[in-house]
Amino acid sequence: YVTNYGGRMRVYRERLGVPATWWLVAALCVVMLGTTLWAGLSIIVGAAVYLVLGGACAAGLLAWGALTIEVADGELRVGSRCLPLGQVGQVTALDRAQTRALRGPRANPEAYLLVRPYLPEAVYIEVVGQPADRPYWLIASRRPDELAAAVSGARPQHEPGGPWDDVARDHPAQPGAPGPADIVSTEGDGNAW
């Protein structure tokens, strides 16, 4: 899609910025560690310690929170990764318990996970197609329902004649393939997390 001003049309965009509470905790850590390292030294050394520690924490938090999720131009872009929407199967917004299970004990080691500890909910995106290097993407989001709706609404619809699980349309979809509802069950987990 192209807008009337010649730019590309975005269906969804979200930046996964670090919350303000994390900045406050980082500032407290800088003050405590800086004071410990500064003890008994000159004021110039103390100022340098605070500047280096504060700069390192700020750079780390900015870098970690700079990642964006975008649905545009027939692709889902998560940071530097791209997934063509033609390879998207089932899309489901997950609650906290489901996200926790797919991040931890029930995670597939081949899956692509983009998680942040300050984002407790996520979206499950099944990857279909041959070959699929990742069985699914688990993308943390502040607005998982909106992201799931944007991905579902922007992906191409399959033609009549049967669903296909790849772009080349030479591998029919497997009926009854497990989805997040089959993978994620919080009952009987036995895990105390």
Image (cartoon, rainbow, N blue to C red):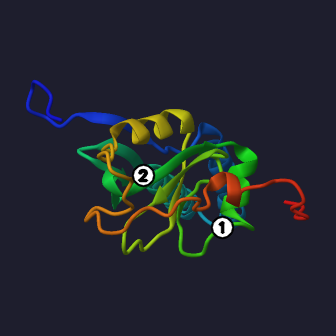
Residue pictured at 64% horizontal, 67% vertical = 41
Residue type of the residue flagged with mark 2: Leu
Measure the alpha-carbon separation of dots 1 and 2.
22 Å
Residue position marked by numbered label 2 in the rendering: 67
Q: x, y (%) of residue 160?
A: 31, 45
Q: Say whether disc 1 or disc 2 marks the residue closer to the N-terminus.
A: 2
The crowding category of the residue bearing disc 2, from other C-alpha atoms within 10 Å (few below 14, some 14 to 19, many at least 20), is: some
Viewer-side residue, 155 vs 169: 169
Residue pictured at 41% horizontal, 54% vertical = 88
Q: Are marks 1 and 2 in contact (CB under 8 Å)?
A: no
Q: Is residue 58 visible?
A: yes
Residue type of the residue flagged with mark 1: Ala
Horizontal relation, residue 30 to residue 48: left or right = right
Residue position marked by numbered label 1 in the rendering: 107
Horizontal relation, residue 19 to residue 63: left or right = right
Residue pictured at 73% horizontal, 58% vertical = 101
Quarter of the image where the C terminus is located: bottom right
Horizontal relation, residue 169 to residue 53: left or right = left
Q: Secondary structure at mark 2?
A: loop
Q: x, y (%) of residue 26?
A: 63, 51
